[in-house]
């Protein structure tokens, strides 16, 4: 059974093929409009989501398939004490593929072990978010033309931001990628990313606190929201939440072709005035998320 629990579940070659397919879907959507007729996606969301859930659902609908599921764990039998394993075992009887988002790290992996159908991790706590990474890679490759030879600034909550962990995992495999990790001391990347990925792969990286100290060097700035729901106390969140605000003045320090990405939702970390800057790519990124999820569904169902 094929599952996507971590971005490393796809080799670099498989990833290239998937991104090529997503680009083909973007150019020729009608070619794929019936590819999943008779297939069902279960969308099992135990945590809030706008883009990930709706883009998965739109992806399956664009392929001619159907969708069932829940958008709030509170309306599922989880509230009665059902385990994720039991839930997925049952959902396997109702659907052909499942996307699951859960507040607990490892939940998607646990689900995949009990599942009869492919399971996609749509975010497990503060751990990983591989389909956001696929979206990010498609955006970068489509707009920059490459995934190697890049200096990437990752800014904000690098501790709890699962999109950052998955993106580092995936990009560390490409040639001549440099990371500049921009965060307050308290929100630096966790040990399993620093030791397990950055040091292990020998990728070049440096940690800085001030965004201004990195901006001029970047090909790409990946902004993130401070992950309020993962903080243990509100005071720490309030102290951290406006640590970075990217505005027009700071954009002047960046190169004219630096891209700004953000997985969204944005809170305060990018001023709305930046939206009209041609380098702001975060809304395009959300659109790419549909194409890449279509490509992923087709690949996991072995239709393409
Ligand atoms: C991200 C997530 O859920 O981790 N959102 C998304 O899927 N696009 C980022 C976030 O919530 O900050």
Image (spheres, rainbow, N blue to C red):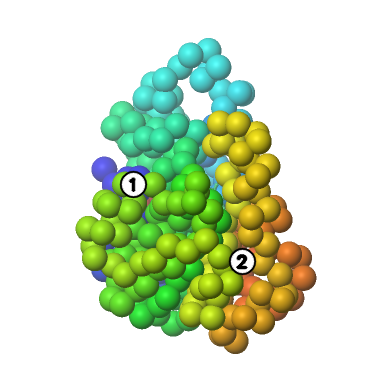
- What residue is rendered at 62% in x and 47% in y? 240
Residue 97 in picture, x, y percent from top left: 41, 42
**SS under mark 1:** helix
Q: Which residue is mark 2?
A: 282
Residue 118 in picture, x, y percent from top left: 35, 42
Q: Decide: marks 1, 2 in contact (CB < 8 A)?
A: no
Q: Name which of mark 1 and mark 2 comes first in the sequence.
A: 1
Residue 263 in picture, x, y percent from top left: 56, 58
Q: Which residue is mark 1?
A: 191
**SS under mark 2:** helix
- What residue is rendered at 36% in x and 67% in y? 205
Q: Nearer the viewer, residue 45 or 211?
A: 211
Real-space Cα separation, disc 1 to disc 2, in angstroms: 28 Å
Q: Quadrant of the N terminus?
A: top left
Residue 51 in picture, x, y percent from top left: 61, 52
Picture layout, residue 146 above or below residue 197: below
Whether residue 64 is visible, yes or no, is no
Relative side of 280 to 184, left or right: right
- What residue is rendered at 48% in x and 14% in y? 81
Whether residue 228 is visible, yes or no, is yes
- What residue is rendered at 28% in x and 56% in y? 197
**Viewer-nearest of labels 1 and 2?**
1
Note whether ligand 1 is within 8 Å of mark 2.
Answer: no
């Amino acid at each position: 059974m094929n599952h996507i629990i971590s971005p490393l579940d796809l080799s670099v070659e498989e990833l290239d093929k998937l991104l090529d397919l997503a680009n083909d879907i973007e150019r020729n959507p009608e070619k794929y409009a019936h590819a999943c007729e008779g297939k069902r996606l279960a969308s099992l969301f135990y945590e809030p989501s706008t883009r990930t859930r709706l883009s998965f659902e739109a992806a399956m609908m664009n392929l001619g398939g159907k969708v069932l599921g829940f958008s709030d764990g509170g309306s599922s039998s989880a509230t009665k004490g059902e385990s994720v394993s039991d839930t997925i075992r049952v959902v396997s009887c109702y659907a052909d593929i499942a996307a699951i988002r859960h507040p607990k790290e490892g939940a998607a992996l646990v689900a995949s072990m009990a599942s009869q159908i492919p399971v996609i991790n749509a975010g497990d706590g503060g751990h990983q978010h591989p389909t956001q990474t696929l979206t990010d890679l498609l955006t970068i490759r489509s707009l920059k033309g490459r995934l190697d030879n890049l200096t990437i600034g990752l800014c904000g909550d690098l501790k709890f931001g699962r999109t950052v962990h998955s993106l580092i995992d995936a990009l560390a495999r490409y040639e001549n990628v440099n990371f500049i990790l921009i965060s307050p001391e308290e929100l630096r990347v966790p040990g399993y990313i620093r030791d397990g990925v950055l040091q292990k792969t020998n990728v070049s990286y440096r940690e800085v606190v001030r965004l201004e100290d990195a901006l001029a060097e970047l090909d790409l700035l990946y902004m993130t929201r401070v992950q309020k729901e993962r903080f243990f106390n509100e005071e720490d969140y309030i102290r951290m939440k406006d640590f970075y605000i990217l505005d027009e003045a700071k954009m002047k320090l960046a190169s004219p072709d630096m891209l700004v990405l953000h997985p969204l939702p944005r809170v305060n970390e990018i001023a709305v005035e930046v939206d009209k800057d041609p380098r702001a790519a975060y809304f395009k990124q959300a659109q790419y998320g549909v194409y890449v999820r279509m490509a992923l569904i087709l690949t996991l169902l072995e239709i393409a």
